[in-house]
Image (tube, helix red, strand yellow):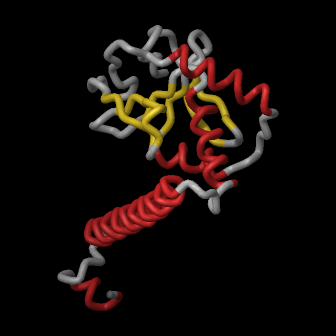
Amino acid sequence: MPRCPICKTQAERIKYEGVPVYNCGSCGGHWVSPARLDVILARRDMQMPEPVKQKMMAIADEADSKQELWCMTCGTSMLKEQFRYWPEIKLDRCPKCNGIWLDRGELEKCQIYWEYAQDHPDEEHADLLARKALLDAEWARRKSEIRDRRDRIEAASRMRMGFGYGSVLGGLFG
């Protein structure tokens, strides 16, 4: 099992709103892949009352790690990056495997910001609309990357199995 990059205790695999993530029971942080974070943000399984939202925002602000963290899956030094287009949320991301570490309360803070942006697309603030457009463009880019990656994997798989275009079997089945 991987170890928490903050307190070095073993992180356990849990389901957060139905999505498998790693959680540190000691410090309350979460480890997710970018794809799983997108799934969590897209879901609305858990509704937070306003006082709970305010408490989670305060917890996230207090828990933000300042020290250098090391990836719990590959050991690479992680980078501090802002979450999407909100500079007030800083997450730790591994430049090698793209895993994301969210300090205690940060996952909930990301959800709160994301849901607010989704619930208020017609808000007067032009920057919010610009953020939504940028998020939509990012989502389209990621889907294209996933599709391209899948196509490359399928092509490599066909080549290994002897069904490539240059093979005898590939000529029969390709």
**What is the quadrant of the C terminus in the image?**
bottom left
Q: Is residue 170 above or below residue 154?
A: below
| 56 left or right, relative to 159 | right
Residue depicted at 42% across the width and 59% down the height: 138
| 45 left or right, relative to 11 | right
Residue 160 appears at what percent x and percent y? 27, 66
Residue depicted at 27% across the width and 73% down the height: 162
Outermost left residue: 166
Q: Nearer the viewer, residue 53 or 128?
A: 128
| 64 left or right, relative to 69 | right
Residue 83 appears at what percent x and percent y? 45, 39
Outermost bottom residue: 172
Q: Nearer the viewer, residue 107 or 17?
A: 107
| 42 left or right, relative to 102 | right
Residue 71 appears at what percent x and percent y? 35, 25
Residue depicted at 61% across the width and 38% down the height: 20
Q: Nearer the viewer, residue 135 or 10?
A: 135
Residue 144, located in which quarter of the rendered image? bottom left
